[in-house]
Amino acid sequence: MASSSAITSPPTPLINKKDVGLSAFSSQASFSVQKFQKRVSKKIVSVMAPQQSERRPATTGSVKTGMTMTEKILARASEKPQLSPGENVWVNIDVLMTHDVCGPGVIGTFKKEFGENAKVWDREKVVIIPDHYIFTTDERANRNVDILRDFCNEQNIKYFYDIKDLSNFKANPDYKGVCHIALAQEGHCRPGEVLLGTDSHTCTAGAFGQFATGIGNTDAGFVFGTGKLLLKVPPTLRFVMDGDMPDYLLAKDLILQIIGEISVAGATYKSMEFVGTTVESLSMEERMTLCNMVVEAGGKNGVVPADSTTYKYLEDKTSVPYEPVYSDEQARFLSEYRFDISKLEPLVAKPHSPDKRALARECKDVKIDRVYIGSCTGGKTEDFMAAAKVFLASGTKVKVPTFLVPATQKVWMDVYALPVPGSGGKTCAQIFEEAGCDTPTSPSCGACLGGPRDTYARMNEPQVCVSTTNRNFPGRMGHKEGQIYLASPYTAAASALTGFVTDPREFLQ
């Protein structure tokens, strides 16, 4: 499906090109390919994409090397004119997010290191979102939210999305739901900025053309006090996706394809930049799905260039000025992968790793016990619209319990309010009810991370589940012997209708 390109070190630059997927390397690529001669060492000392043009002197008279998007964002944030992969720099942070799982630890670190009466560096740049272990009777989980509330009152944090009434989430106007989707919906994701969060899937925000990555509690405690963090500049892998997107594919299929090709360690501490006509055609929610799982490949961050789609999404969400950046023509990429998306088929990731990619149709004999549609990668409005489309096309009822967990309060409202195209005015909720699914539940991370035993849809038994979540490690959704097949909402819905892992083309064609 893809071709990768890499250059050996000087003095004789060569490209070692190999096919690693279903399609050949694009004929339009401006790369020259030569075979390694015996006298050339096969050990790659440095890997980068070829210069598109010779480097020219900058106006200052010094030689200026082109930079990638990630390098440019970090250069601006560290007040440096130039950065290269491997450099360590102090970066000024635009937004720091924490939630109920990590927040108490961050607060504890902050108070220990800066003092009980210390103030955060900027009360308007800290975003605190309870979202993981919310709708539970677990006293320790509930206490975590209390700790966040006390801290936010003490610090006068502007963006604290509180929840007090657990019996009715709608009675909490400030409560949002899953942090990664709420950050976008509330206008905290902006091109060219640096956003950090105490959650590995903070990389989701890279869809907005910003540097977004997850950090630990200790680092976050330091940012609370200083607004800065020492970061190492990552090299960049570029993924060029072209071709018309088939109407049976979603962005989840694209990222599963990529992770399957480069493995769960293929992008370790690297930036993953997504470009191409297919990416340009994706909605913001689909771009968020694409960036959400870069950490499953070991990536430091994922990033999509901002464009008119980005700006339109942000129109009514933020008044904060922002300035997008783009990779230079002569930017150096560690390697480049090219995909013809028109040839891709629906995929799943088999237990117990996101890189165990397989065609959905090849897993048709896998009997399942349940389906889970939700989380930051599969619980957005468009994800539920996609699932409803499959149920509508089938006109039949699900064969296994099908759990629906909207990511945010806004998504929950959309599920009950927005008509599904081609349904004659029916909403997702109506279609789900007719298909025999569970009633859409309170918005949260739900069972994506397992959580306390009374978490809705948690796997408390060793079952087989098709899930739109982002990880399928042992114990991820609860029971350590559970079998999780990661899939798009299309594939998840199709599987719910048959009771087996199912290619959605059975219902969409």
Image (spheres, rainbow, N blue to C red):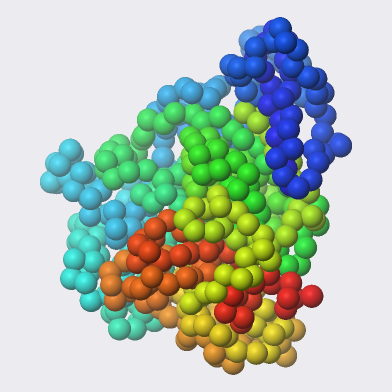
**Residue 26, relative to residue 10: is it above or below?**
below
Q: Position of residue 60 (x, y in %)?
A: 64, 12
Circle count: 0
Q: Position of residue 224 (x, y in %)?
A: 29, 43
Residue at position x 46%, y 58% in the image? 472
Q: Position of residue 486 (x, y in %)?
A: 54, 62
Quadrant (top left, top right, bottom left, bottom right) of the C terminus? bottom right
- Extreme residue toward the left, this view: 116
Where is residue 141, by image quadrant? bottom left
- Left or right side of 143 for 302: right
Where is residue 384, by image quadrant? bottom right
Asked whether the viewer can see residue 490, the reply is no
**Residue 374, relative to residue 68: is it above or below?**
below
Viewer-proximal residue among 500 and 175: 500
Where is residue 94, by image quadrant? top left
Viewer-proximal residue among 413 and 472: 472
- Left or right side of 234 for 241: right
Residue at position x 29%, y 76% in the image? 454
- Extreme residue toward the front, this view: 365
- Left or right side of 124 for 279: right
Residue at position x 39%, y 81% in the image? 170
Asked whether the viewer can see residue 69, the reply is yes
Q: Position of residue 400 (x, y in %)?
A: 52, 83
Residue at position x 64%, y 76% in the image? 494
